[in-house]
Amino acid sequence: MDSDSEAAGRQVRLAGEQPLQDSVLVAEDDRLFRYILQNCLEKWGHRVILVNDGIAAWNALQSEHAPQMLILDWMMPGMDGVELCRRIRQGNPRPYRYVLLLSAKDSKQDVVAALEAGADDYLTKPFDADELRARIRAGGRILQLQDALIHAHDELQFEAAHDRLTGLWNRGAVLDALKRESQRAVRSHDPLAVVMFDLDQFKKINDTYGHLMGDAVLQEVGRRLPAAFRSYDFVGRYGGEEFLVVVPGCGRTDLIALAERARQCISDNAFRTTAGDVAVTVSVGLAAAAQIREIEKDCENLLRQADAALYVAKAKGRNRVEISPAVNPSPP
């Protein structure tokens, strides 16, 4: 490996340590143009990652924090800039990479070929530094817009699947999770269970302290419940003061232990509020199926049985866990 390649390797590794929006990956096999590009970009405040060929550029792009702005030479050993563009555009990866292609070729056909391959812009050699800077700025504006759109899209996706007050999965999302886990249970023949929670005398909390305090209690429940379950269980707000947890692959003994731990997590420590400590208890109903055969029917049966067990817990004095008799799988 020559000194340029070693330096390029070091810069690629450094780039992976920290995500920087102003980083630029330069793939150029000509030593003079590499120097000119690096000098200009660093003077304009960019962090520059240099590689000598298309294969090294492609490898650098596999880093988690690879730059979104790329300057690629057309003619390079291993993989040329046009082929690298095509590979970058395959599969519509996120985030979007903005590609400026450099070449001594200046015919209209060459420009068309570069843009068709996936380049966003095209600049001929030798290039003017001011023109290069203007094109880099134009690409930066597009990437900023992309980041804003991705952020807005992610927020919308989160809001569509999560309860706004507690941050847990909402009713639709947790029921979708139940259906997905039922399909998985059919394939794997693993058990599946649901745990239903209802805050005891929640209306009294609202009437005594006000609805804002009631909201604060629900938010705290939303914080405590997930901590009592496994990372791959699905904890959601079922509606009002009811919560539902989908628990895949868990035996009866472990299921009861999980539910009891969650009950204690809520009931054993008072909720600290601006009005003072508030005692909150929760009743819990469990239902488990050793095997799922008819997804829709068995899911409905699980929910119905868990709800029935919850009412038994309420009738027996609240602040307790009740488990429904084993839910038999639907006949084949």
Image: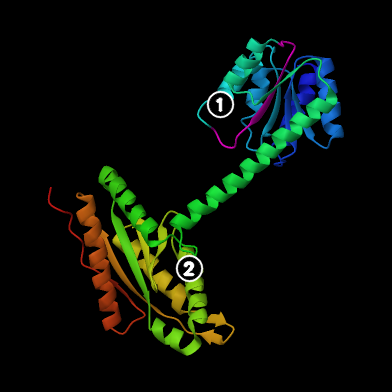
- Check contact, mark 2 vs mark 1: CB within 8 A: no
* Spot occupied by residue 109 in the image (x, y as percentages of width and height): 63, 10
Q: Residue furthest bottom?
A: 208
Left or right: residue 83 versus residue 3 is left
How many residues crowd around disc 2 within 10 Å: few (fewer than 14), some, or many (20 or more)? many
Q: Which residue, given by chain and number where applicable, does mark 1 sit on?
A: 89
- Which residues fall within the magenta stretch? 93-106
Number of residues whose C-alpha sits closer than 10 Å to that of mark 1, classed few (under 14), some (14–19) or many (20 or more): some
Q: Residue furthest front?
A: 108
Q: Which mark is residue 222?
A: 2
Q: Residue at x 87, y 33 (%)?
A: 43
Above or below: residue 292 compared with residue 131: below
Q: Is residue 141 visible?
A: yes
**Does residue 292 show up?**
no
Residue positioned 50% across, 87% down in the render: 209
**Mark 2 vs mark 1: which is more N-terminal?**
1
Q: Is residue 126 above or below residue 293?
A: above
Task: Classify mark 1: helix, strand or loop.
Answer: helix
Q: Amino acid at mark 1?
A: Arg
Does 102 lie within the magenta span? yes
**In the image, residue 134 lies in the stretch drawn in magenta:** no
Q: Is residue 90 above or below residue 250?
A: above
In three-dimensional space, the C-alpha distance between marks 2 and 1, rounded to whole angstroms, equals 41 Å
**Residue 83, how many percent across, how many down?**
60, 16
Residue type at mark 2: give it: Gly
**Residue 299 left/right relative to 154:** left
